[in-house]
Amino acid sequence: MKRVFIRGNVAIAEASLVAGLKFYAGYPITPTSDIMEYLHLKLPRYGGLAVQFEDEIASINAIIGASWAGAKSMTATSGPGFSLMLEGLSLAHITETPIVVVYVMRTGPATGVPTRSGQADILQARFGAHGDYITPIYAPSSVQEAFDLTIKAFNTAEKLRTPVILLSDAVIAHLWENMIFRDRDEVEIIERKRPNTDPSNYLPYKPEDDGVAPMAEFGKGYHILVESLTHDERGYYVPTTEVQRRMIERITKKILLHIDYVYEQKTYLTDDADYIIVSYGSSSRTAKSVVNDLRARGVKIGLLDIKTLWPLNEYAIKKVCESCTRIFVLENNIGKFVWDIQRIVRDIDVIPVSIIDLDLPDPDEALKVIEKWL
Amino acid sequence: MAIEALTLKAPLHPLDKYLRLTRIPTLWCPGCGLGVLLGCLLRAINRRVEEEVLKRDNLVFVTGIGCSARTTFYVDFDGAHTLHGRAIAFASGAKLANPDLELIVIGGDGDIAAIGGNHLIHAARKNMDMFVIMNTNFIYAMTGGQLAPTTPLKVITTTTPYGNPERPLDVIKLLSVFEINYLARGSTTHPHILENYFYKALGLKGFRFVEVVSTCPEIFGRHMGIRDAIQLYNELKKRIIFKPKPKPEESMISWEKGIIIGEFMINNYESFIELIKKTTYGIEN
């Protein structure tokens, strides 16, 4: 354990090394490239390898292949690159392949402002790929959280045999902060379950009691079938409603069974709050500052800071919000997460505070909106 | 049922050990060249395994989408039936994460050279350690007969109803600029030669590529007015010209002038894995 002063993207890269990353594939893109540069330099010293590919499509497919060859694998990108990766993400879901995709959001649509921030892509990260699935998504709002949640992302991917997204943004990427660095023996590191049966009895998609199937790797005699078609427990293509239902249930239920592990939120001054601001990622820094300003004026207001943007623990959110009179959802987009809160907390007013800003939403601007509703 | 009982209890063929017999018969149409291709490949693999050049359990088949991509789930090796066009990318990751594996990518010309063309070019440029087999049947067969990058000029397909205005791709000429370690073209009409190319490629390092000119009587044959499997086979066979050392300049596929098969390139350049070991880890081979 040591105190270090680093920026968000480096915290992500360092955390991936602690988590046991062995293969990185990526394509340069602002504001993410320094993760890749850092890993190209450092990963070989940890017995791993970073390779630059011809595009993001190749990158995500390469890390899926590497994961089946036994390596903890990751890629990192931003909006335009993530759009290209969506089909690959879908492949990772149907084949139940643990991978980590670091998504550092920038301003869009299209090329937008590549160097600046935004939170417009939270629903794309959640639902952008085709098919039914649940992608766990973590959103850090500090450099420390960028570090901690990257390790959590790897652990979730390995524990649940699923792709996981670490959804950061350009503000956190370039933010320098003090943080506590914890090494491999100071944090929990989860490795994927391996089969303990002999190859002739191994079914690559047959879940155990925890909902997760053990994962064999290439080259060990298991003769695995990694199958992109709808498949049964053997990996055989079966185009029937029954098998489709069973497969979708398998890949979604294993996430929901472990919602208490997957889901994280933080609260700040919510116990006696009449008003609550719900926020996430870099915007929750703005929200915290608004809470502090209003508390100084005697307003009982608190912050619900969501760390897991998907799937949500609706019970946990409701519990924090149930005794307040009004909720604000502060985010740097046209108002997207607000739909979730309106859906979950139906009997309390939920006010969107949607502030589009190339940096953090300005606290004064947010305060002006919120003040009107106090 | 009868066929299943027969094949499961008493293997009829020495190559049955490499097949997932529960998944046979294949979906390939009568007269399709893919069965010949697979037979040649399994015989070549068998030779390399018996020579102990290859370990069976280290072989990984990676395919994209299409008729030829189905090969993965008919064979009893580690395998991945992945996305359309992405087999080379997937295979690259697997190989780089575990260099002991031997990656075999099989795909149609659409899968490998159209939607997957960018990955093909860059894997070749890097001399990426893998063996890629491209089955050229001149058509998108699984989706019902649309234009492929290899479809000859003027041919009527479902997406070129007035005749194909696009000049076809010569993948041999394309790859010849990358100085890869093995580049050959075979034909399913000449299986012994084809098997030998597969056998050779499986003994080399770096990027190895074999184009297999093949027959698709059901879809391409229909467009050409030669739907009879034997007739299409004979029409293709008539046009095949074997040359021991052809030049890439003569590789253009022409239904009028003939189709040259042969080994266009055999090299022993350092492979991508060897270059990574040298540059990144300081290990001399």
Image (cartoon, rainbow, N blue to C red):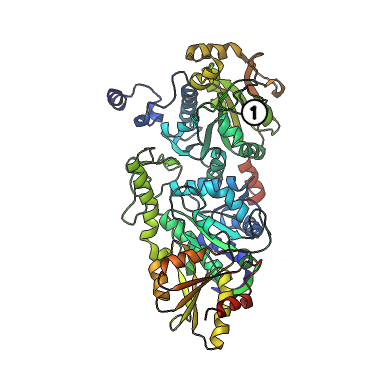
- Report the front residue among A282 and A363: A363
Q: Measuring from the top left, give residue A355's x and y in whole percent.
A: 60, 69
- Report the front residue among B247 and A149: A149
Figure quadrant of the C terminus of chain B: top right
Q: Measuring from the top left, give residue A316's x and y in whole percent.
A: 40, 70
Q: Measuring from the top left, give residue A176's x and y in whole percent.
A: 64, 71
Check the image and report above or below for A297 versus B135.
Answer: below
Number of marks present in the image shown? 1
Give the left or right position of residue B98, taking residue B19 as reference.
right
Check the image and report above or below for A48 versus B12.
Answer: below
Q: Chain of mark 1?
A: B
Instruction: Name the residue at 54% across, 49% down.
Output: A86
Callout 1, which amino acid? Val
Whether residue A169 can be seen here: yes
The extreme front residue here reads A372
Q: Residues within 10 Å of mark 1 (few under 14, many from 20)?
A: many
Give the left or right position of residue B183, taking residue B28 as reference.
right
- Look at mark 1 in the image and give the residue it sits on: B171
Residue B123 quadrant = top right
Check the image and report above or below for B5 versus A304.
Answer: above
Q: Measuring from the top left, give residue B20's x and y in whole percent.
A: 38, 32
- Report the front residue among B82 and B14: B82
Figure quadrant of the N terminus of chain B: top left
Whether residue A213 can be seen here: no
Check the image and report above or below for B261 versus A233.
Answer: above
Secondary-structure class at tag 1: helix
